[in-house]
Every structure is written in structure tokens, then in C-alpha cells.
Image (tube, rainbow, N blue to C red):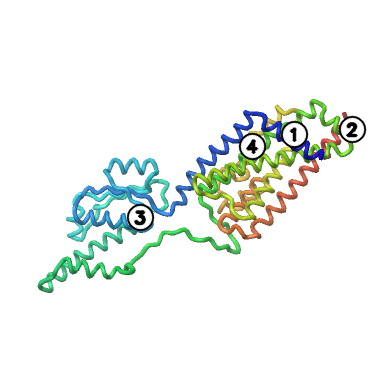
């Protein structure tokens, strides 16, 4: 009963602080919204492009219609300056400009410079777009080429009949197809599994924010050392242990709350589920427990809450940079990975990165489960007995 009383009291104190509640609500929502929007753009099932037709001929309009009906593309049409704004604002991955004289150049068989592609710096699909446009231009040109050849060698050649028969060759399946789809990642025996850059950034933000939030929320021990609460707990058998466990449980619940808010915002508003599967959730649980125990340990080390809160941002940033919160762990050199694995953030991010494509691969999770679990127990034991020994000297 004493444990639950301590837990409820600690949570009540934390959530009674309006500034603290606003911080743990506004910051996760803001960060998850930014990263969720970025991931939504990253995981689109189509390639958004903008098409500006400056030729305004039958051939250019035919090319525009075919691109608009192409599976895997989302095509907007309009004026050139509007398309430039779309690319500049990252609303379109590329601007396709059908220049004046396109049809004339098409008839001569030399279309060099007839179509201009302006791509966004962030696009991964520029080459795919080029191939799609080239295939459609070739499809249109083949009609003209075939008709010209037949009309030179045969009498009474009908252009519409030639176009109809050529179109039949593309049905039900075209001569050439380009498939744009997201594929499943298969586990390999060795090597890192790639992870999209925005997903890696989101994981890094979440891991970093949990560490910062829990360090700021753990100044209770410093305050209770100063006001004598812990000294009084020493006079009651088992009270100090329950005080420790109740407060670490409160920190753990706060970490879970931050994680739930962060992931729910991305899932509900952007359709992005950052952490999925039992193993990634287990890694997050153990990471939160480990950070809670580290916070407990630092509270026992520092003499006042002001010292702890002044040091929290520095410790969070330094260990966050070392642990890879600000860079993608997929494919990094081994020496850099060795540095990352000196921190709990590094172990958590490495496991989550490896599990991103194959969330049921137990081999990727086991090392982090063991290290984070052992570190949690170790920091709790060290902080408890270190505090106990220090209090006996008073």
C-alpha cells in the first residue's frame, strides 16, 4: 500500500504543475507533428509532379493525359510559375515542362530539349520520372514513325487505324512497365538494414526527448535530501526502498506517457506508425526504465535540484549526439557505432533501427534487451545503496 501511495502522490505532484503538464503535452505534439508530416511525405504511395504544357498541341495534350492516368503518379497541371512554387515548397517532387515546339521536334524524331525536368533537391524519384516520361514519349512517337514508314511503302494507309493497332499492342499489358511500390525488407545474416531518413530522425527525437523529460522530472530526490524527507524515511524499515521504487515507477509512467503522445499524434493525424510490433515496444519499455534509473542515479549524485536541472540539457545533448539521436545509425562505420553503444540511446536506436524493416527479428532485439535491462538494475542498485550509505554518514 505504501508503494501505491507514493506513486499516486508523486504523479499528483508532477501533474499539478501546469507548466510541466504544458511542456509534456505541447513539445511531444509539436515534435511528433513535424516528424510525422515529414514521414507522411516520405511514405507516399505515389510521386507528386507538376506538369506545365507550353506547346498546347495535340501531341503535348496526349502526353499530359497519359501521364495523368499513369499509376503511381499524381499530376497537377498549370502555369510554369505555379509549378516552380510547387517544387520550391516541396509539394511536387518534379516539374515537367513540355516546351514550345514539342510536336514539331517529335515529328522529326529529335526531341532533345523539348521536355525539361526541374526536380526537388529532396526527391528520390527523379530517375523514375524520367523513365516514365521517356516511355510515354516513345509510345507517342512510335505511332508517327510507324505511320510515316507505312505511308511510304503502302497506299491507303490510315493514320487512325495505325494508332489503334499500335495501342492494341499495349493491351492488356504494355510493352514496357515501371512498377513503383514499397517492398518488404528481408533479414540478412549480416549488415545493417536501411531506414528512411525521416523515420530515423523521428526515432532520434523521441529517444532524445524522453531522456530530457525524465532528467528534468527527477529532481525530487535532491529536494527530499534537502528537506529531510529521506532521512525520516530511513527511520522506518523498508520505507526508503519503497520510496525509491514508487518514484522510479512515476518516472517510468511519465516516459510511457511521452511515448504514447508522440506515437499517437503521428498515427492518428499522419497515418505513420513509428513503433510497431512487440519487440520494438519492449525495447522502448526497457529504454524508458533505463533512463528512469539513470535519472534516479543522477538525483542521488547531485546535491540540489538546480544542479541537476542545469546539467540535464548538457548531459542529454552530449549522450544524444554520442548515441546517434541526431544521425542515422543505419550503415555507419563500426568505430562510430562503438561510440554510440556507450550510451542507452545508442542501444535503443540500434535495436529500433534493425527492427524497423523486420520487427519480429529477435536476434536484433536481444543485445539491447540484455544491456538496457542490466543497466536499469545496476543504476537502481547503485543509486539506492549510494544514497543509503551517504545518509548514514549524516
Q: Residue furthest bottom?
A: 154
Residue 9 tag number: 1
For residue 112, side relative to residue 288 (left or right): left
From what the image shows, is residue 42 above or below residue 222? below
- Quadrant occupied by the C terminus: top right
Measure how far apart labels 2 and 3 are at the Cα level. Answer: 74 Å
For residue 151, side relative to residue 342 (left or right): left
- Quadrant occupied by the N terminus: top right
Q: Nearer the viewer, residue 97 or 15?
A: 15
Residue 71 tag number: none
Q: Do tag 4 and tag 2 residues touch (Cβ < 8 Å)?
A: no
Q: Nearer the viewer, mark 4 or mark 2?
A: 2
- Which residue bears the numbered disc 3? 129
Q: Residue furthest left?
A: 155
Q: Nearer the viewer, residue 346 or 361?
A: 361
In primary-sequence order, the first of circles 2 and 3 is 3
- Residue 91, by quadrant, is top left
Residue 212 tag number: 4
In primary-sequence order, the first of circles 4 and 2 is 4
Q: Do tag 1 and tag 3 residues touch (Cβ < 8 Å)?
A: no
- Residue 188, by quadrant, is bottom right
- Which residue bears the numbered disc 2? 235
Amino acid at each position: 500500500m505504501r508503494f501505491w501511495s507514493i506513486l499516486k502522490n508523486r504523479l499528483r505532484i508532477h501533474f499539478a504543475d501546469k507548466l510541466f503538464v504544458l511542456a509534456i503535452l505541447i513539445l511531444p505534439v509539436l515534435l511528433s507533428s513535424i516528424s510525422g508530416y515529414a514521414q507522411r511525405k516520405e511514405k507516399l504511395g505515389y510521386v507528386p509532379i507538376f506538369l506545365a504544357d507550353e506547346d498546347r498541341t495535340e501531341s503535348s495534350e496526349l502526353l499530359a493525359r497519359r501521364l495523368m492516368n499513369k499509376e503511381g503518379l499524381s499530376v497537377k497541371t498549370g502555369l510554369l510559375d505555379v509549378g516552380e512554387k510547387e517544387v520550391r515548397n516541396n509539394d511536387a517532387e518534379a516539374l515537367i515542362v513540355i516546351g514550345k515546339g514539342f510536336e514539331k521536334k517529335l515529328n522529326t524524331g529529335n526531341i532533345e530539349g523539348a521536355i525539361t525536368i526541374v526536380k526537388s533537391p529532396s526527391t528520390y524519384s527523379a530517375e523514375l520520372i524520367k523513365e516514365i516520361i521517356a516511355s510515354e514519349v516513345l509510345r507517342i512517337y512510335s505511332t508517327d514513325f510507324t505511320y510515316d514508314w507505312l505511308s511510304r511503302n503502302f497506299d491507303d494507309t490510315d493514320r487512325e487505324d495505325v494508332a489503334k493497332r499500335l495501342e492494341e499492342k499495349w493491351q492488356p499489358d504494355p510493352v514496357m512497365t515501371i512498377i513503383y511500390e514499397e517492398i518488404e525488407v528481408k533479414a540478412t545474416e549480416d549488415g545493417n538494414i536501411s531506414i528512411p531518413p525521416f523515420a530515423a530522425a523521428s526515432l532520434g527525437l523521441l529517444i532524445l526527448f524522453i531522456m530530457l523529460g525524465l532528467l528534468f522530472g527527477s529532481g525530487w530526490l535532491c529536494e527530499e535530501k534537502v528537506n529531510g524527507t529521506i532521512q525520516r524515511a530511513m527511520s522506518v524499515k523498508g520505507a526508503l526502498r519503497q520510496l525509491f521504487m514508487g518514484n522510479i515507477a512515476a518516472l517510468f509512467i511519465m516516459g510511457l506517457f511521452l511515448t504514447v503522445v508522440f506515437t499517437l499524434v503521428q498515427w492518428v493525424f499522419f497515418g505513420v506508425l513509428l513503433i510497431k510490433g512487440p519487440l520494438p515496444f519492449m525495447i522502448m519499455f526497457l529504454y524508458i526504465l533505463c533512463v528512469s534509473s539513470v535519472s534516479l542515479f543522477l538525483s542521488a549524485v547531485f546535491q540540489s535540484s538546480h544542479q541537476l536541472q542545469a546539467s540535464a540539457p548538457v548531459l542529454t545533448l552530449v549522450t544524444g549526439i554520442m548515441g546517434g539521436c541526431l544521425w542515422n545509425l543505419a550503415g555507419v562505420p563500426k568505430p562510430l557505432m562503438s561510440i554510440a553503444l556507450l550510451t542507452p540511446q545508442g542501444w535503443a536506436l540500434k535495436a529500433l533501427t534493425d527492427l524497423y524493416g523486420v520487427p519480429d527479428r529477435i536476434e536484433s532485439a536481444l543485445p539491447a534487451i540484455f544491456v538496457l535491462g542490466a543497466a536499469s538494475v545496476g543504476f537502481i542498485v547503485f543509486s539506492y545503496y549510494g544514497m543509503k550509505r551517504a545518509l548514514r554518514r549524516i
